Amino acid sequence: MLIYQYLLILVCLICCWAERVVVDWNIGYLEVNRDGHFTRKAIGVNGKLPVPPVYITSGDTLILNVVNSLDQPTTVHAHGIFQKGTNHMDGAGMVTQCGIPPGTNFTYEYTVEQAGTYWLHGHFNHQNSEGLRTPFIVYDTDELPMQYDEDVVVSLEDWYPVMVADRMKEVLDPTKPFPPPPTYPYGLINGINGNDTQVIVFEPGKKYRFRVLNMGSTEWFKFTLPGHKLHVIEADGVYCEPQEVDGLSLGPGQRYSAVVEAKQSAEFNYVYNATLFANFVPNLPGLNPRYYTGLIQYREGAPIKQVDARDDSEIVWAQDIKMQAFDRQPLLAGVSRTVSTIAGSQKFSDNVTRAILHKYPYMTPPIVPTLFSAMSMGALASDSEIYGPQTEAQVIGLDEVIEIVMTNDTPIDHSMHLHGHNFQITEYGPASSNNNSSIPIQRCGGYPMRRDTFVVPALHYIRVRFLANNPGVWLFHCHMDIHFALGLAMTFVEAPEVLQKTQSVPEQLKKMCVAQGLKAEGNGAGNQGMDLTGLPAPPH
């Protein structure tokens, strides 16, 4: 009885400490010149761009009130947040909900038990690429791998001179050549033109946690701080044993935290470097890559310390395969199922070149959100065919250990994100199509690092594992926005029989579907049983 009373007091204390953090977003259009070159239409919040970051503490409940002032539906995804028990709050358009209709509102409400560096972004019709994105920082109350004095958030974005939604129309036009002529984006640092970066002030002897996020839609970033070592302690919300490196390389969607110890003297100032680059368009001086530099200020007016420049090959970059998880979670054993995927592209029957992971290019469900099908189809929800071939659905069971082997036979890197989970990174190696036989296979150590977004390099493969302990419908997709739109994605339908018993879809979400002429139940076509009449056939 005494133990019960102690537990009750502990629960009450936790409830008292946790807060309900209310954030109001009115999502609308505005005209901006973010890169110092082009004024263009964009999507912001409350008339502002960049969107202000959101800060909470682990255990808090986020209440995000969204008003949609656009002329199209919208959704908001918390990238990296598992949404355990709240699958309908994941914000993946036509996967876990219909879009919020224009002129209406919806409230995302969920408790965040994780901690680390995340971000919020639009997940409907390229709205992430148009500006609807911001850091989402969840402070921790537990032990950290390394203590520090202050946080420094560094968000990195690519910014195109034209709206990406318009660009996609050109990419998907069968009468136009593929790929279309490249469009080179500019880099933004904390939402500002990379050439006008904010000064980061250092105090001698202090330790700073740099939270570096690639919130870009397509491009990679490299981040270095010459003259200082970076001690990586987090990747994508998972703590690791400190790893000393010179720099960070981040694909779209990836995040790192690294602790930097300031010099003991304020004799010199230093610089930090952010490089925007892509390996899927030609290298052209001044266009790809683009170089941005900001000031690390120890003392106003102090001279800048000249640090010898080094080639990328001489820099020690953070590597997840070499990290060890701080919580010492061992390699998941007893693989239940191996899902083999091959990233590729080809021209399909509609004369459009699309991307594929499995059999068909993924296409956003046009009639019923996949979650709503899983919730309403009873026992048939365990049959992947009811979701329609365009979803590339894989039905997996509760507590299965899933291994994904992804082979990248393309000449470009891919940044892959899984909703609702993170992966153990277990192995990288050259693909059979790679003619360089000298590339070694890299395998994880005893406590493999976990992250929610991995990069599979060009002409390589990767092995990752995750535990299916979060019933729901979870999208697995390339976080390069155009590749996702071209079909480089699939869906994991996890333990639908458990999902139906433990979760429900709010009536407001169902009404939002009906208001747009969509359906809130039934199979992928909105019908019963195996009847998929009305569902557009996927290209073949």
Image (cartoon, rainbow, N blue to C red):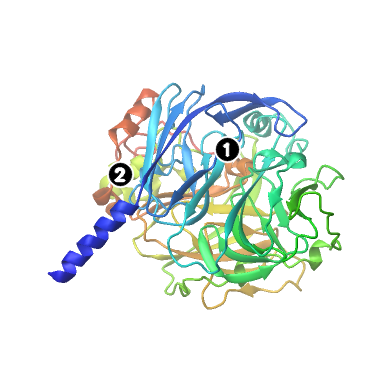
- Residue sitting at the far left: 1
Question: Which is nearer the eye, 46 or 336?
Answer: 46
**Dot label at residue 455:** none
Mark 2: secondary structure: helix
> Residue 323: x, y in percent?
59, 70
Tell me: 434 left or right of 253: right
Tell me: 6 left or right of 250: left
User: Label 1 is placed on what type of residue?
Assistant: Asn
Tell me: 228 left or right of 259: right
Mark 2 Cα within 10 Å, few/some/many (few <14, many 20+)?
A: many
**Residue at left offset 39%, top offset 47%:** 385
Does residue 409 lie above or below 533 as drawn?
below
The answer for how far apart the CA atoms under marks 1 and 2 are is: 28 Å
- Residue sitting at the far bottom: 446
Nearer the viewer's eye, disc 1 or disc 2?
Answer: 1
Residue topped by disc 2? 375
Quarter of the rendering occupied by the C terminus: top right
Residue 327 seen in render: yes
**Residue at left offset 30%, top offset 40%:** 505
Does residue 511 lie above or below 59 as drawn?
above
> Residue 426: x, y in percent?
56, 70
Mark 1 Cα within 10 Å, few/some/many (few <14, many 20+)?
A: many
User: Label 2 is placed on what type of residue?
Assistant: Met
Residue topped by disc 1? 128
